[in-house]
Amino acid sequence: MARYGMTIPLAGIPLHEHEDWFKEMIDLGYTDFWSSEANGHDGFTPLAMAAAWAPTARLGVAIIPAYTRGPALMAQSVASLADAAPGRFVMGIGTSSDVIVGRWNGMPFEQPYQQVRDMVRFLRKALAGEKVDEAFERFTVKGFRSGVNLPEPPPILVAALREGMLKLAGREGDGAILNWLSAEDVKQVTPFVHAGGEGKEIAARIFVLPVEDRGMALAIGRRAVAAYLNVPVYAAFHEWLGRGDQLADMWKLWKEGDRKAALDAIPEEVVDALIVNGSPDACREHVQRYVENGVHTPALAILHTGDLKQSIRDLAPR
């Protein structure tokens, strides 16, 4: 059966009240729950609760920053969740951003490629039960061995935007996690992942706005686009994808401090490309285009929460 995921925790719902929501989503046909880690809940706790409350769901994190936990703590967290949900957990790791790593956690956002590569290499060894005593380029680990015995280490997916990290995801990871790209963009990025070997999984967080009010869709969509695409790593990504001309005015006005004009400068076609919007049927068809273009695991992230439960029901797989 094709995978069909939902981003958790659900906006506006306290974490301790998620049990019934998880169970209903499984009944509706959702197969995966994917968390994230920015300024809300951490990436592991919601999945630990889902592991107990939804024992058939596959659980993934998209993503844990490669900087904000030391190597041993990272291995402990990953091994603990893999032990709680054997065969059902997918680890996602990536650079995150200079905002999260630098401004919020006070860590230098340096050598992002090397940081992710070295953490993946360390986790491979640690989760396999090896004693790790090694100087990596970005850190040194002296004599660590995981105390959690995993019969099968979890897959590791690498969050990737441009060519270098996409190739790393295919070469040293079990696949890639994509974010903030269009269904057509999928065809541009996935060949770099598959160049690393066969059987690589492509997961993607897809932002969905199931509203037919065009004005509302554009207003919410433009705010979401501006919030992400002014972050340097995402700006560079969309330059690489070929949207530089479409976004140039927005970037210029944002840097000048004219937020309202910057929002107005985001073209409708950019909103429609990056944020699935419209009727539930139109949204479901749009998500299917991501799958047809190479995404194995779509993870929906609902932006509009007017009637969240009804939106979840309306967007469920058919």
Image: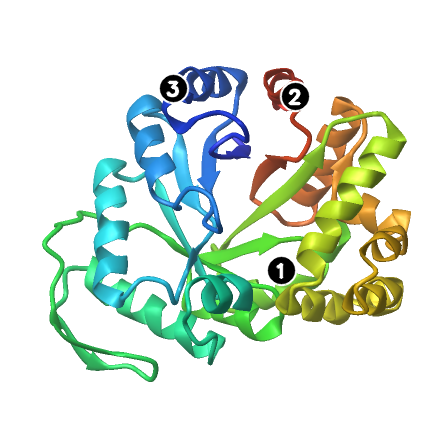
- Name the residue tied to disc 2: 311
Three-letter code, disc 1: Thr
The residue at 65%/21% (across/down) is: 311
* Coloring applied to the structure: rainbow
Q: Are marks 2 and 1 in contact (CB under 8 Å)?
A: no
Q: Secondary structure at mark 3?
A: helix
Residue 268 lies, with reference to residue 49, above or below; the image says: below
- Name the residue tied to disc 3: 19
- Quarter occupied by the C terminus: top right
Three-letter code, disc 2: Ser
What is the distance, in whole Å, between disc 2 and disc 1 at their CAs? Answer: 29 Å
Residue 142 lies, with reference to residue 60, above or below; the image says: below
What is the distance, in whole Å, between disc 1 and disc 3 at their CAs? Answer: 35 Å
Q: Earlier in the sequence, mark 2 or mark 3?
A: 3
The residue at 69%/44% (across/down) is: 290
- Name the residue tied to disc 1: 190
